[in-house]
Image (spheres, rainbow, N blue to C red):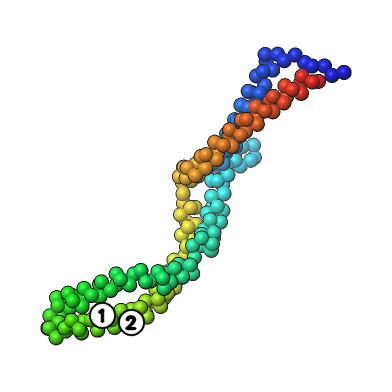
């Protein structure tokens, strides 16, 4: 026959002790993501925080992701040579061409400007704008191609992340994941408290 155990005052502390143990365990686990920043040798084991230990690997994975998936020169080329995007800069180019023909020529070549009337200026402007619209997409495409050969996005991102100090890396990740870390601690504490209550209940029905 099942007998019920009387709950003593000490047993009331079990849920709180269990909650504290779970909280401190999770808190230490989260801290160990970043600490120790430098490897420590203890009893033949090398102990180091997860992120400091894997920083170069993390940098390599992120750099590949950025270079191949998030930001590629092919996408940059498509964006800047897109006719719809180029239409947005033609009015600005036209303003500079107009200023060059009406103002700059008079300043730099006044003798020639004396023989150029408004009609000629209009014709020159139209011819220049037509030529620019024809050649600009190819010029930009060639520029991106040259830029691609000179810049290695993956290498740049890798070097930047790999060079982060342990403090900077921890600050960045904490800034991003503070709410998530806090949520994990709270959930762990609640779970520990519930496990403590369950232990009391199991002891009562033994």
Q: Position of residue 24 (x, y in %)?
A: 59, 30
User: Residue 160's spot in the image, x, y percent?
Assistant: 46, 54
Query: Is residue 147 in view from this perspective?
Result: no
The alpha-carbon separation of the residues under discs 1 and 2 comes to: 10 Å
Rendered view: 24 above or below 77: above
| Residue 105 percent across, percent down from the top left | 17, 78
Q: Element under label 2? A: helix
Q: Quadrant of residue 206?
A: top right
171 left or right of 189?
A: left
Which of the two residues, 113 or 151, is positioned nearer the viewer here?
Answer: 113
Q: Within 10 Å of the Cα at label 2, are there few (<14), some (14-19), or many (20+) other Cα atoms?
A: few
Direction from residue 197 to residue 144 in the image, left or right? left
How many marks the image carries: the answer is: 2
Determine crowd level at label 1: few under 14, some 14-19, many 20+ residues with C-alpha closer than 10 A.
some
Query: What's the residue at 67%, 15% (across, down)?
Result: 10
Which numbered mark, 1 or 2, is in the foreground of this view? 1
Q: Specify which label sits upstream in the sequence, 1 or 2.
A: 1
53 relative to 154, above or below: above
Residue at 17% of width from left, 74% of height from top? 103
Find residue 186 and report its image quarter.
top right
Residue 114, how many percent across, how many down? 12, 83
| Residue appearing at x 48%, y 52% in the figure | 161
Q: What residue is shown with label 1? A: 125
Q: Which residue is mark 2?
A: 131
Quarter holding the N terminus? top right
Q: Residue at x 37, y 80 (%)?
A: 134
């Amino acid at each position: 026959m099942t007998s019920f155990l009387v709950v003593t005052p000490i047993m009331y502390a079990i849920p709180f002790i269990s909650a504290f143990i779970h909280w401190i365990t999770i808190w230490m686990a989260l801290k160990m993501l970043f600490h120790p920043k430098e490897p420590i040798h203890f009893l033949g084991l090398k102990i180091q925080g997860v992120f400091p230990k894997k920083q170069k690997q993390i940098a390599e994975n992120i750099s590949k992701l950025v270079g191949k998936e998030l930001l590629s020169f092919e996408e940059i080329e498509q964006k800047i040579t897109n006719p719809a995007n180029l239409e947005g800069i033609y009015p600005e180019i036209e303003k500079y061409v107009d200023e060059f023909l009406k103002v700059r020529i008079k300043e730099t070549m006044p003798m020639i400007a004396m023989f150029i009337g408004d009609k000629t200026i209009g014709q020159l402007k139209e011819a220049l704008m037509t030529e620019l619209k024809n050649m600009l997409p190819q010029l930009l495409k060639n520029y991106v191609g040259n830029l691609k050969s000179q810049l290695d996005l993956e290498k740049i991102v890798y070097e930047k992340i790999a060079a982060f100090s342990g403090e900077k890396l921890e600050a960045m990740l904490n800034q991003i994941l503070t709410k998530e870390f806090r949520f994990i601690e709270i959930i762990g504490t609640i779970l520990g408290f519930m496990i403590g209550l369950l232990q009391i209940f199991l002891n009562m029905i033994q």
